[in-house]
Image: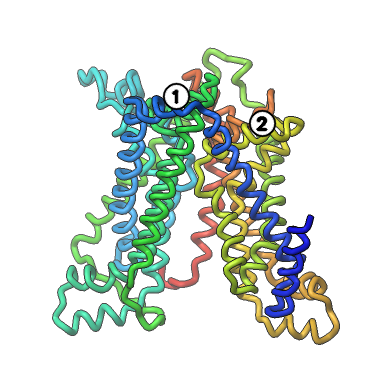
Amino acid sequence: MRSISALVRRLRDAEESDDRPVGLTLLAGAIAAAMVFPLTWLFIRASTVDPGRARELMFSMETFDILLNSLLLTGLVTAFSILLGVPLAYLTVRTNLPFRRFWTIAAALPLVVPSYVGAFAFVSAFGPNGEFQSLFAPLGVDQVPQIYGLPGATLVITLYTYPYVYLTTRAALISFDEGLIDAARTLNQGRLKAFRRVTLPQVRPAVAAGALLAALYAISDFGTPAIMRLPVFTRQIYVENRSFGSDYAALLSLQLLAVVLVILALEWRIRSNRTVSGSGSEGAETRVDLGWLRWPAMALPAAVTTLALAVPVWILMLWLQRAGDGYRQDLAFEFVQVANSVSVSAAAAVVAALLAIPVAYFAANHDSVLALVFERLTYVGFAVPGIVLGLALVYFGSSLTPWIYQTIPLLVFAYVIRFLPQAVGSTRTSILQVDPKLVEAGRVLGESSFGSFRRITFPLIRSGIVAGAALVFLTTMKELPVTLILRPSGYENIVTQIWAAQRNALYQYAAIPALLLMVISGLSMVVLLTQETDEPGL
């Protein structure tokens, strides 16, 4: 109690010196601590493993293979995402590519397809006795190239993660100062050299940010490696947890966390490098004339979007046509699954939006180390793979709060830890756009701090709060590993229905829920991209 009193006194002293409110500080700190605390149970569980047993498990050939496969998958997906995302962004922003508006949206839409949906669609299309083999059988083709393993997992995850690089690079190119290019060209720099020496340094932080998201997605993806039968951290952790190998699962989780920290450190180092700075003004509407190459250039976005979108949609439609074959009551789609997904996702979105407000407000209005630490702590759950978070909450719930273990509140709490940063980022951006003079005017007129927030700030940031909540809702709808590990007994939703159909190799039962997920997410992506006002000539 004495230490708590001392902490409160120090916070009050800080409030007197820099107008930092004690209540808001304590509330933001409590929220940040709640987001991180459950993860400490991984370390507690791992510390109970016998040291000899831990060394045997950590340095086994199986662990080495898992580490190697995970690193190879992450590296290949990141590299190929850059190789696809950067050229596509350049074509849709800086060139006279035909039908640029269409390709702008089409190139981003793969992001709305859950990778596990794409994975079993590709298995159905390219796997043994798949659709392509059936199509080519009359031509004497006995088999098509195998889709399983590292090549298949790399292909599928890349197709559904390159939009991260595409969107961040595209945003950087839209705000790029074209005067720098003009200056380089007047100095007799060729187009390729100008791109390498001027454009690339300008967009490198954006490329690094998108590559980070792609790398984190690849290292944390559970569904695709499981479907492609590739032994990686996430798949093995799930298998060990289901077979009651909690010791090995905890140790693998810590190894996976270490890999994630290395990825974050590498991205920070790349992003923090000095880059060329422009004047900050928007460039003119001039574009690179591709000449006769403008039509062949469409082959890249056409090929990528055909693989990422047309193949899964074609397979889902085939499954939908065969939905009546071999009816299984236990796998039948029911609207209660939609209700479960919507209700839990809505609850997570509301809770995340409410918790994001004090953290975002504190971070936006108080330039201090404490504010930065609280905000960054809320991002830990987003960086941690869902399978690791789920396992940590299994230990946390079963050991400390057994009364909440395998209940909807714990599932919602897991979603909030996982996706709170999406709400914090959106809300903080909105708060930074509020004119401080309006809040000061309210205080002058006698409003309290809370009254000024309620009557002035909140109405101005409402759209940012709603946008963050909507993003949490959509990502929660698609979350697979956390749902599989923490769902209550008998609880079924859209995601569990898709996974049950895949596990039983009865893909026709996944058609309706998969299409439903894609439609909901696709509508949101189209609305987002069509709101762009930076390019009136798009």
Closer-to-camera residue (444/462): 444
Task: Name the quadrant of the N terminus.
Answer: bottom right
In the current view of this chain or complex, which residue is farthest to the right?
446
Q: Amino acid at mark 2?
A: Gln
At 54% from the left and 51% from the top, the residue drawn is 380
Task: Name the side, left or right, on which 356 lies relative to 523.
Answer: right
Task: Name the side, left or right, on which 281 lies relative to 395.
Answer: left
**Quadrant of res 272:** bottom left
Q: How many badges with numbers are in the image?
A: 2
Spot occupied by residue 40 in the image (x, y as percentages of width and height):
59, 42
| Front: mark 2 or 1 | 1
Mark 1: few, some, or many residues within 10 Å (few <14, many ≥20)?
few
Spot occupied by residue 466 in the image (x, y as percentages of width and height):
67, 59
**Quadrant of res 96:** bottom left
The answer to whether residue 123 of the structure is visible from this angle is: no
Mark 2 and mark 1: Cα distance apart in space: 42 Å
Q: Amino acid at mark 1?
A: Arg
The answer to whether residue 140 of the structure is visible from this angle is: yes
- Report the disc number at residue 337: 2
At 83% from the left and 76% from the top, the residue drawn is 448
**Quadrant of res 225:** top left
Colour setting = rainbow
Task: Name the quadrant of the C terminus.
Answer: bottom left
Closer-to-camera residue (184/331): 184
Label 1 element class: helix
At 55% from the left and 37% from the top, the residue drawn is 42
Q: What residue sits right under mark 1 in the picture?
A: 53
Residue 278, relative to residue 74: is it above or below? below
Label 2 element class: helix
Closer-to-camera residue (10/461): 10
At 28% from the left and 54% from the top, the residue drawn is 298
In the current view of this chain or complex, which residue is farthest to the front?
2
